[in-house]
Image (cartoon, grey):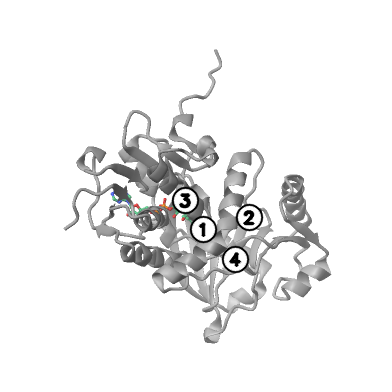
Amino acid sequence: MLTRPDVAIVGAGPVGLAIAWRCASRGLRVTVHDPAPGSGASHVAAGMLSPVAEAYFGEHALTGLLAESATRWPRFAADLADAAGADVGYRADGTLVVGLTADDLAEARRLWSYQQGLGLPITPLRPSELRDREPALAPRVRGGAVAPGDHQVDPRRLVPALRAAAERAGAVLRPDRVGPLSEVDAGVTVVAAGCGAAALTGLPVRPVKGQVLRLRAPGRGAPDFRHVIRGYADGESIYLVPRDGGEVVVGATVEERADTEVTAGGVLRLLRAAVDLVPELAEYDLVEAMAGLRPGTPDNAPIIGPLPGRPGVLVATGHHRHGIVLTPVTADLVTELIVTGEPDPLLAPFTPDRFGKEPTWN
Ligand SMILES: Cc1cc2nc3c(=O)[nH]c(=O)nc-3n(C[C@H](O)[C@H](O)[C@H](O)COP(=O)(O)OP(=O)(O)OC[C@H]3O[C@@H](n4cnc5c(N)ncnc54)[C@H](O)[C@@H]3O)c2cc1C
């Protein structure tokens, strides 16, 4: 029977489990509380590790954190494979960003210029170079670029591996939903509950719905393309993520809604854009249609650090579209903060106290 834990973690998604693994590996007594581990956004997520393709105007600090975490991923995946005895589907084939029409390409180019201006690795390709890399792309696709450092992992393999690694390191999972934080008795409580963090902390985390499809190549073969393909197709922005086992993840809608219904319109938009970009996908089996809720924040960046006015409570939530890529850096920074008491300077732009400080008009 575990005595009072040093660290109690609320939420067994990728973020909470990675923190549990890292803390338990440092010799801390850890409990993780979740009635349904791995049932949050990660169950739906595509698993793109995209610091470059996800570098948007006005999100400079977030881009820096994404890039930092992406550099940690190869080592993190290897350590995790050792610790859990399981492979997490980390693949480094790179990402192609493509535009279907001239308008789509113009929109994509605007973003590449910005990303190149930041010094990020993205290189425009001639149409022939694009097709040499991925002959499965539709002849209509007007142009594209390659982001060789944007990789992928399979979140449905990642979460069980993190759980196994955490438990092997001594963390104890408890199947309970945490109500008020005052019910948790531990040295430090870490709220890593994804969208559930809003009710527990009062922080501005909101659900952002995303519908995703899973297709399967016929005959159990691998898909005919290796890169992650992110496309602009007649104004739709979608991605296609091929996996070794034959699966292709097609995502995702972005909706300011809190339900997880799959709609005919959502499926139609995703399939139309997917088949416009890679026509052979029309022959694939449609095996799953699902919606999940990203833990969004007002500035699209995660919330990591001490909860103001609540000594002994840390927060690691609000990872929005980036919780998979940000798992390694979040776990490392939170663990260091717990072990040393000193926040890493990388955390400064992401602490919970940044909210409520916005200037007013008068
Ligand atoms: C459609 C879609 C596509 C995505 N694609 C990508 C991608 O390609 N790359 C990427 O990096 N990210 C992606 N994401 C984002 C990513 O899935 C999330 O940012 C990530 O899952 C957040 O991890 P988390 O552990 O914080 O939360 P979650 O994965 O949501 O897990 C939260 C856990 O907390 C538990 N919980 C909640 N409340 C309580 C409570 N009161 N008590 C106990 N437990 C509680 C839940 O049961 C759940 O298990 C995508 C998300 C969606 C929806």
Residue at mark 4:
240
The residues bearing labels 1 and 2 have C-alpha atoms spaced at a distance of 11 Å
- The disc, 4 or 1, on the residue closer to the chain's N-terminal end is 4
Query: Does the Cβ of the disc 1 residue fall within 8 Å of ligand 1?
Result: no
Residue type, numbered disc 2: Glu
Which is nearer the eye, 301 or 28? 28
- The disc, 3 or 4, on the residue closer to the chain's N-terminal end is 4
Q: Position of residue 242 (x, y in %)?
A: 58, 71
For the residue carrying disc 1, how many other residues have a C-alpha within 10 Å: few (<14), some (14-19), or many (20+)?
many
Q: Is residue 207 visible?
A: no
- The disc, 1 or 3, on the residue closer to the chain's N-terminal end is 1
Q: Residue at x 22, y 38 (%)?
A: 182
Q: Is residue 71 left or right of residue 320?
A: right
Label 4 secondary element = strand
The residues bearing labels 3 and 4 have C-alpha atoms spaced at a distance of 30 Å
Q: Nearer the viewer, mark 2 or mark 3?
A: 3
Residue type, numbered disc 3: Asp
The residues bearing labels 2 and 3 have C-alpha atoms spaced at a distance of 36 Å
The residues bearing labels 4 and 1 have C-alpha atoms spaced at a distance of 15 Å
Most extreme residue toward the bottom is: 219
Q: Quadrant where the N terminus lies?
A: bottom left
Residue at mark 1:
266
Q: Nearer the viewer, mark 3 or mark 4?
A: 3
For the residue carrying disc 4, how many other residues have a C-alpha within 10 Å: few (<14), some (14-19), or many (20+)?
many
Residue at mark 3:
332
Q: Nearer the viewer, mark 1 or mark 3?
A: 3
Q: Is residue 144 left or right of residue 177?
A: right
- The disc, 2 or 3, on the residue closer to the chain's N-terminal end is 2
Residue 236, label in figure: 2
Label 3 secondary element = helix
Q: Position of residue 320 (x, y in %)?
A: 49, 48
